Image (tube, grey):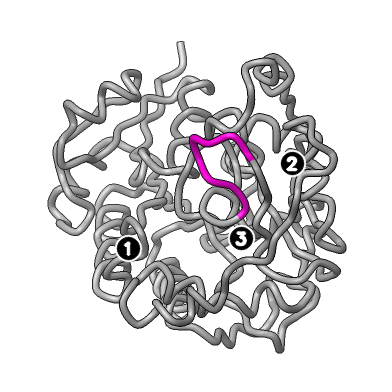
């Protein structure tokens, strides 16, 4: 009988962290997670081994990582609060734990690293000249992981577009296009249609990461791949998928209230972050996954209609009749 592998998932209550925990469990891994109130977290995800702790405290992460061969670093400050003060120290906790235990770090990456000089097609080697504070932090995170890899800390990064999937969270779909827990009366699109945009369905991202982890021919200590996901070439495909899921082909689309966001951004952290990221909606961009396909043959891919239906159902935006259709999402 093979020995059960152990993974530590930081951010297991979030979108991508939760999906990674589910995939690891399905593959037979033992999964640990940190939480300030583990008893409360246990109620929503009873199959995880919850430990009391804080990702900001290196000793808590090190203790939780003992015996683990994988650390999934998917933790982020809620609502974008205190990003500058919290994100890098939390990553340093993971790096220190990985160095001490020999575990491999997995980081779900984003496109915030890139500025318009890298558009419209992003490859793993595209220049990283971000326009925002959050983007600069993302660049620094990857720099620190690359430096750690030179001293033996193995790292895998999968960069992807805007997340959506069966959990509300800090993403444009749940906080911009729709309102969780409400029947849809309209779709709020972040900017003008006609501009291509990259979307990443969380279960597909997690499945692709698992396939990368399970390869037997890992080439280097520091690996970066791009996930293509769903590229909406003109901004209409996501809108039409939402209309189809709710059965309203004439569901209205309104422009995102950027004037309100700009006016309130000095006082509301979330609005400030959204304003800074607006440039990602004004120019077409997609991720080139050629390197990923060369490594795996294909990336996991759920058809857009099924992915959107499952997402809307989980957010409480679908009528009960849509539940059966939403449950039939399969991975390629």
Q: Can you see residue 215?
A: no
Residue 78 position, x and y percent, is 33, 55
Asked whether the residues under the numbered discs 2 and 1 touch, taking CB atoms below 8 Å apart as contact, a structural biologist would say no
Mark 2–mark 1 Cα distance, whole angstroms, equals: 36 Å
Asked whether the residues under the numbered discs 3 and 2 touch, taking CB atoms below 8 Å apart as contact, a structural biologist would say no
Q: Which residues are magenta?
A: 177-184
Which residue corresponds to the image point at 71% horizontal and 35% vertical from the top-left? 307
Residue 177 position, x and y percent, is 62, 53
Q: Residues within 10 Å of mark 2 (few under 14, many from 20)?
A: many
Mark 1–mark 3 Cα distance, whole angstroms, equals: 17 Å
**Closest to the observer, 178 or 76:** 178
Residue 284 position, x and y percent, is 79, 73
**On the image, numbered disc 2 is attached to which residue?**
242
Helix, strand or loop under label 1: helix
Q: Earlier in the sequence, mark 2 or mark 1?
A: 1
**On the image, numbered disc 3 is attached to which residue?**
159
Image position of 321 with respect to 260: above or below = above
Residue 212 position, x and y percent, is 63, 44
């Amino acid at each position: 009988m093979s020995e059960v592998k152990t993974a530590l998932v930081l951010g297991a209550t979030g979108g991508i962290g939760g999906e990674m925990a589910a995939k690891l469990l399905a593959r037979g891994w033992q999964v640990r997670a940190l939480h300030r109130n583990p008893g409360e977290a246990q109620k929503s995800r009873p199959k995880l081994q919850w430990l009391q702790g804080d990702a900001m405290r290196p000793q808590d992460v090190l203790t939780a990582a003992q015996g683990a061969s994988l650390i999934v670093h998917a933790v982020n400050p809620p609502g974008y609060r205190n990003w500058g003060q919290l994100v890098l120290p939390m990553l340093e906790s993971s790096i220190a734990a990985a160095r001490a235990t020999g575990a491999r770090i997995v980081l779900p990456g984003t496109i915030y690293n890139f500025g318009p000089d890298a558009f419209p097609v992003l490859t793993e080697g595209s220049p990283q000249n971000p326009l925002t504070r959050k983007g600069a932090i993302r660049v620094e995170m990857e720099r620190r992981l690359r430096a750690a890899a030179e001293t033996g800390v193995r790292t895998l990064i999968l960069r992807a577009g805007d997340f959506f999937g069966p959990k509300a969270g800090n993403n444009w779909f749940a906080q911009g296009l729709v309102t969780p827990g409400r029947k849809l009366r309209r779709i709020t699109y972040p900017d003008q249609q006609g501009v291509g945009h990259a979307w990443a369905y969380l279960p597909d991202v997690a499945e692709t990461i698992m396939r990368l982890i399970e390869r037997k021919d890992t080439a280097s200590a520091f690996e970066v791949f791009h996930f293509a996901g769903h590229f909406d070439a003109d901004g209409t495909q996501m809108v039409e998928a939402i209309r189809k899921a709710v059965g309203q082909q004439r569901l209205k689309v309104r422009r995102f209230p950027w004037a309100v966001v700009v006016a309130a951004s000095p006082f509301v952290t979330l609005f400030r972050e959204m304003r800074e990221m607006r440039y990602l909606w004004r120019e077409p961009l997609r991720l080139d996954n050629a390197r990923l396909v060369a490594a795996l043959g294909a990336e996991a891919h759920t058809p857009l209609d099924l992915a959107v239906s499952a997402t809307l159902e989980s957010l409480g935006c679908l009528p009960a009749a849509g539940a059966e259709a939403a449950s039939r999402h399969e991975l390629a």
